[in-house]
Amino acid sequence: MQVGEVVDGDQKKEFLISGSRDKTLIIWDIQEKGDTDADNEWGIPRKVFKGHSHFVSDLALSKDSRYVLSGSWDGTLRLWDLKKGSTVKRFVSHTRDVLAVAFCPENR
């Protein structure tokens, strides 16, 4: 899971992105929770990303929160454009599960 921030006009909006054994990534809008909201959900799913054919094992959010890199047990990595909701690039060469992914500090 990663927490990101998007600028929408004059406001900054936080979101959460998660990867799952259901082979998807989901962007969640984070909702403010008041004292009387004990039973309410904190997040609302905004966008679902589909493309992996096996469990998503790890993900990394770019510093500018425009892209996410995901690794999967299907042996691939995918670079996703969060605004478009689609795969920008697919990396294929591993013969086994991809367990960890990361962006370098320069966001490359």
Image: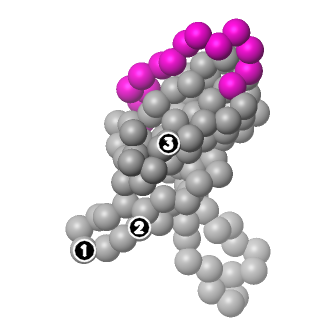
Q: Quadrant of residue 24?
A: top right
Residue occupying the point 36% across, 70% down? 12
Label 1: state its secondary structure: loop
Q: Position of residue 60 (x, y in %)?
A: 56, 44
Relative to the observer, which residue lies in front, 19 or 92? Answer: 92
Extent of the magenta region: 85-98
Q: Position of residue 39 (x, y in %)?
A: 76, 74
Tell us which disc is closer to us: 1 or 3. 3
Q: CA distance from mark 1 to mark 3?
A: 28 Å
Identify the residue position indicated by label 3 in the image: 103
Q: Position of residue 106 (x, y in %)?
A: 39, 48
Q: Amino acid at mark 3?
A: Phe
| Disc on the earlier residue, 1 or 3 | 1
Identify the residue position indicated by label 1 in the image: 10
Does the magenta portion include 63?
Answer: no
| Disc on the earlier residue, 3 or 2 | 2
Label 2 near label 3: C-beta < 8 Å? no
